[in-house]
Image (cartoon, rainbow, N blue to C red):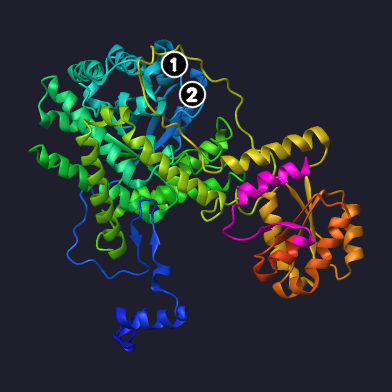
């Protein structure tokens, strides 16, 4: 097909547009409302404008080489070594290019994990060609720390060249201490142990990296992007200092530290966070007198965004997280299977996690361009804001005496707790929506299959001589899921869930919108909504409520219908022995009269849904 010059004119036929023209159009739509209504904010208070001009003079952030795919990592975490080995071999045969060996007691184990014994390590790695270019990442905890040594011994015992094995050993006592909220040893006692392991592995010929600065600690605990970045910087610098004290030059130490970040479903923030880390680490290297080299950055899709309810939505969340981390320059990505919050994932869940990356790499070609976000006004601005705020917090941690000292002073934990509290409030009020958990629930969803596996019990690790506030992992959906679990238990024991009667007033045109809202609202808490055809007669309404077997009711209709019928309807429901009456919508000027008629609570967008649901449970018990 021949393309003519006229066909290429496109935008040339339209008048040029500028920001001022756009603002005039926006102001017309806002009708006097402040423009700031369109300006969003991150959990760190960073502003996100609705539109940005193109960034001028922006250069790509140095990271993963252009046209080089990231490593497709697959979790190996089955407590049974033979089963874990079979899973690992299957993953490598079907597209994975690396394995994340998650040992019991590691920060990322989430209840399961590999057996760290030497016999189990040998079984897990049996038949895997470790020197054939696959990536191996170890996630270990204090109780499973010897797994790193066992892996090294296995490789030497097989006669393999350690330098030919791409292994990240994941030494991270700082991350473990932060999660546990304690340590048997002071930092001055930890340093010799870390450096001894580093020197020993380096002497064997392993090229590393060896120590991990793990930002998941902060993200899993509900922290912000700035807090996660600052934690990674502080941990990385602490390990650099420790390695240098062992007589290793900073140039050699430079390649012994790598970072791990969480990738979540917030596309722009995740993408900007990965870019920001590289710029921040380059600044650290320059401050150390080093020539900056691209930091190896591994990504795990976020634990805290996983839901147990409607877990298939987790596939969408993981896809967005992987997309963002990949475009942000991650060197390796591990996708948490969509059923991990329910238990040990089955083959289908593992396949979906693996194929998420394969599709993005092989079909969407995401790795073909290096830093494709470079020059984007929004991403460049957000990257810069994250850099500035994270560097400031990193300096605060350094002034406190470094990361371990900052943890002892609870400096980081206080900031994370404050961010988590705001995040939990937004979840409770459904400002931040979790599809399938806090919105659009399905009370009749089928049971999801997971493997039947018994977690490994590990021996305690030392006396907690140094105690501080812990940063345990959390999931945002957990409070709503606790109510759903309670509902399932009641269904199993009593044969029925708690119910709420939707007292729809008027015609479908009047009540459908709010009845739909109320049904979703109450069923997120496991309270089954009994829908109705609509009532004009209070007597008929009361009779239908009595026949429903429900203890509580919710009035649903338009404001116009409420003005005409709500008070009489509420009085009729109260006379029919309704324990509690809700109304879908804001009360407005009618509130006093409605409450006098028996309405106890009002449900509406932005209200504290979780608190009302917890109260509703008390009314139905």
Residue 32 position within the rendered picture, expressed as x and y whole percent measured from the top left: 44, 80
Q: Residues within 10 Å of mark 1 (few under 14, many from 20)?
A: some
Q: Which residue is mark 1?
A: 123
Q: Is residue 155 left or right of residue 74?
A: left
First of labels 2, 1 by sequence position: 2
Residue 277 visible, this angle: yes
Q: Secondary structure at mark 2?
A: helix
Query: Based on the displayed image, in which of its 4 quarters is residue 501 positioned?
Result: bottom right
Query: Based on the displayed image, in which of its 4 quarters is residue 614 positioned?
Result: top right
Q: Is residue 454 left or right of residue 569?
A: left
> Is 599 one of the magenta-colored residues?
yes
> Is 417 one of the magenta-colored residues?
no
Question: Where are the magenta residues, as a range?
Answer: 596-621
The C terminus, quarter of image: top right
Query: Based on the displayed image, in which of its 4 quarters is residue 145 positioned?
Result: top left
Q: Residues within 10 Å of mark 2 (few under 14, many from 20)?
A: many
Q: Which residue is mark 2?
A: 84
Query: Closer to the camera, 112 or 429?
Result: 429
Residue at 10% of width from left, 37% of height from top?
A: 288
Query: Closer to the camera, 22 or 37?
Result: 37
Is there CB contact under 8 Å for labels 2 and 1?
yes
Query: Closer to the camera, 4 or 192?
Result: 192
Does residue 207 lie above or below 544 as drawn? above
């Amino acid at each position: 097909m021949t393309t003519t010059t006229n066909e290429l004119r496109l935008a040339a036929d339209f008048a040029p547009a500028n920001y001022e023209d756009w603002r005039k159009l926006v102001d017309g739509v806002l009708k006097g409302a402040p423009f700031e209504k369109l300006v969003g904010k991150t959990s760190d208070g960073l502003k996100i404008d609705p539109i940005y001009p193109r960034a001028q003079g922006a250069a790509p952030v140095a990271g993963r080489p252009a046209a080089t795919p990231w490593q497709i990592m697959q979790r190996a975490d089955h407590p049974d070594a033979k089963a874990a080995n079979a899973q690992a071999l299957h993953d490598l045969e079907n597209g994975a290019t690396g394995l994340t060996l998650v040992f019991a007691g590691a920060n990322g184990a989430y209840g399961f994990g590999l057996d760290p014994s030497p016999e189990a390590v040998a079984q897990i790695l049996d038949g895997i060609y470790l020197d054939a270019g696959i990536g191996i990442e170890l996630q270990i905890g204090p109780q499973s720390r010897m797994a790193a040594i066992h892996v090294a011994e296995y490789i030497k015992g097989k006669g393999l060249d350690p330098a030919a094995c791409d292994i990240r050993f994941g030494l991270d006592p700082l991350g473990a201490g932060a999660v546990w909220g304690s340590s048997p040893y002071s930092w001055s006692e930890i340093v010799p142990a870390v450096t001894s392991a580093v020197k020993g592995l380096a002497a064997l010929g392993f090229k590393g990296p060896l120590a991990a600065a793990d930002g998941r600690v902060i993200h899993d605990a509900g922290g912000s992007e700035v807090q996660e970045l600052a934690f990674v910087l502080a941990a990385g610098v602490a390990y650099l200092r420790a390695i240098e004290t062992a007589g290793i030059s900073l140039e050699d130490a430079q390649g012994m530290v790598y970072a791990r970040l969480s990738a979540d479903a917030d596309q722009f923030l995740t993408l900007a966070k990965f870019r920001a880390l590289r710029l921040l680490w380059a600044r650290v290297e320059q401050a150390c007198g080093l020539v900056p080299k691209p930091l190896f950055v591994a990504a795990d899709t976020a634990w805290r965004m996983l839901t147990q309810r409607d877990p298939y939505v987790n596939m969408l969340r993981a896809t967005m997280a992987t997309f963002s981390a990949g475009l942000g320059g991650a060197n390796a990505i591990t996708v948490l299977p969509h059923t991990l919050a329910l238990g040990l994932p089955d083959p289908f869940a593992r396949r979906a996690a693996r194929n998420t990356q394969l599709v993005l790499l092989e079909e969407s070609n995401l790795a073909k361009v290096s830093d494709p976000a470079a020059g984007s006004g929004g991403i460049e601005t957000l990257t810069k804001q994250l850099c500035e705020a994270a560097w400031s917090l990193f300096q605060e941690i350094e002034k406190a005496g470094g990361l371990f000292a900052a943890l002892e002073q609870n400096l980081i934990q206080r900031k994370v707790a404050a961010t988590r509290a705001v995040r939990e409030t937004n979840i409770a009020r459904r400002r931040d929506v979790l599809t399938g958990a806090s919105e659009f629930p399905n009370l009749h969803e089928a049971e999801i299959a997971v493997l039947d596996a018994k977690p490994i019990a590990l021996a305690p690790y030392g006396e907690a001589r140094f105690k501080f506030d812990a940063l345990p992992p959390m999931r945002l959906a957990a409070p709503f899921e606790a109510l759903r679990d309670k509902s399932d238990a009641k269904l199993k024991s009593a044969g029925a869930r708690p119910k709420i009667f939707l007292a729809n007033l008027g015609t479908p045109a009047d009540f459908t919108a709010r009845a739909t809202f109320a049904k979703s609202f109450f069923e997120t808490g496991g309270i089954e909504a009994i829908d109705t055809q609509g009532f004009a007669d209070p007597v008929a309404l009361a009779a239908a409520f009595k026949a429903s077997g429900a203890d509580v009711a919710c009035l649903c209709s338009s404001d116009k219908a409420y003005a005409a019928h709500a008070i009489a309807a509420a009085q009729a429901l109260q006379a029919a022995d309704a324990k509690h009456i809700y109304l879908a919508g804001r009360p407005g000027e009618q509130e006093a009269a409605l409450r006098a008629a028996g309405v106890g609570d009002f449900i509406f967008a932005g209200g504290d849904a979780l608190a009302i649901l917890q109260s509703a449970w008390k009314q139905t018990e």
